[in-house]
């Protein structure tokens, strides 16, 4: 499957109330299986793919639970340097945090040091106190912030 078709599939995928968790996982498992070797993608192609995945999160209820198939796909796109993924992750969480995006940010913080780590922690902290987010998203961010600052 070509990258443009994969992006189109992601852009057209919507979770419905009657959809089972396994259906979401199966969708992203299929995306992961059909992705071209990500080391052959240009930064622009990676950016388009990452943006379509964050677009998926934005279109869903912010309290949609973590789906590890989705997480595995988005985290694998820009390995090992994450020069495209990391700024997109910070931008998304700064503008539209969800349970999944705060989970992704927390996972990424585990590998950070210094200024990048502090910047990412401040994003988590800002989510935790932003009353425009759902209570569960704020609580999730606060739990991650406490965990990261206490360890």
Image: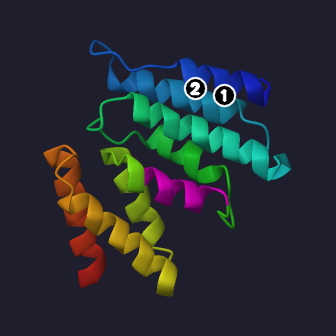
- Percent position (x, y) of residue 110? 44, 73
Query: Residue 30's quadrant in the figure?
Result: top right
From this view, report whether residue 17 is shown above or below residue 25: above
Whether the magenta-drawn stretch holds residue 43 is answered as no
In the rendered image, residue 133, in percent from the top left (x then y), is placed at: 22, 46
The magenta stretch spans residue 90? yes
For the residue labelled by badge 2, is the local secondary structure a helix, a strand or a loop?
Answer: helix
Q: Name the image quarter holding the C terminus.
A: bottom left
Whether residues under marks 2 and 1 lie with C-beta atoms below 8 angstroms apart, the answer is yes
111 w.r.t. 53: above or below: below
Residue at 44% x, 43% y is: 68
* Above or below, 45 relative to 147: above
Q: Along the horizontal axis of the image, is 40 left or right of 11?
A: right
Residue 113 appears in the figure? no
Q: Nearer the viewer, residue 34 or 58?
A: 58
Q: Residue at x 26, y 70 (%)?
A: 145
Q: x, y percentage for residue 126?
A: 28, 64
Q: Which residue is mark 1?
A: 7
Q: Which quarter of the picture shows residue 148?
A: bottom left
Here the colouring is: rainbow
The residue carrying mark 2 is 10
Residue placed at 57% from the left, 52% from the top? 75
The answer to which image quadrant residue 140 occupies is bottom left
Assess disc 1: are there few (<14), some (14-19) or many (≥20) residues with their C-alpha within 10 Å of its C-alpha.
many
Where is residue 20? Give x, y as percent: 32, 19
Between 43 and 150, the one nearer to me in the picture: 43
Which stretch appears magenta?
A: 84-93
Residue ID at (63%, 36%): 32
Query: Where does the N terminus fall, quadrant-wise?
Result: top right
Mark 2, Cα crowd under 10 Å, few <14 / some 14-19 / many 20+, is: some
Please tell me whether the stretch drawn in magenta is mainly helix, strand or loop.
helix
């Amino acid at each position: 499957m070509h990258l443009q078709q994969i992006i189109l599939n992601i852009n057209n995928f919507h979770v419905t109330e009657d959809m089972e968790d396994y259906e979401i996982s199966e969708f992203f498992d299929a995306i992961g299986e059909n992705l071209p070797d990500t080391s052959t993608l240009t930064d622009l192609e990676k950016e388009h793919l990452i943006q379509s995945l964050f677009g998926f999160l934005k279109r869903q209820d912010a309290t949609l639970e973590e789906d590890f198939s989705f997480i595995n796909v988005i985290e694998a796109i820009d390995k090992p340097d994450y020069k495209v993924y990391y700024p997109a992750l910070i931008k998304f969480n700064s503008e539209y945090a969800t349970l999944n995006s705060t989970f992704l940010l927390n996972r990424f913080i585990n590998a950070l040091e210094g200024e990048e780590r502090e910047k990412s922690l401040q994003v988590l902290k800002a989510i935790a106190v932003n009353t425009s987010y759902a209570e569960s998203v704020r609580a999730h961010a606060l739990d991650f912030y406490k965990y990261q600052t206490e360890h």
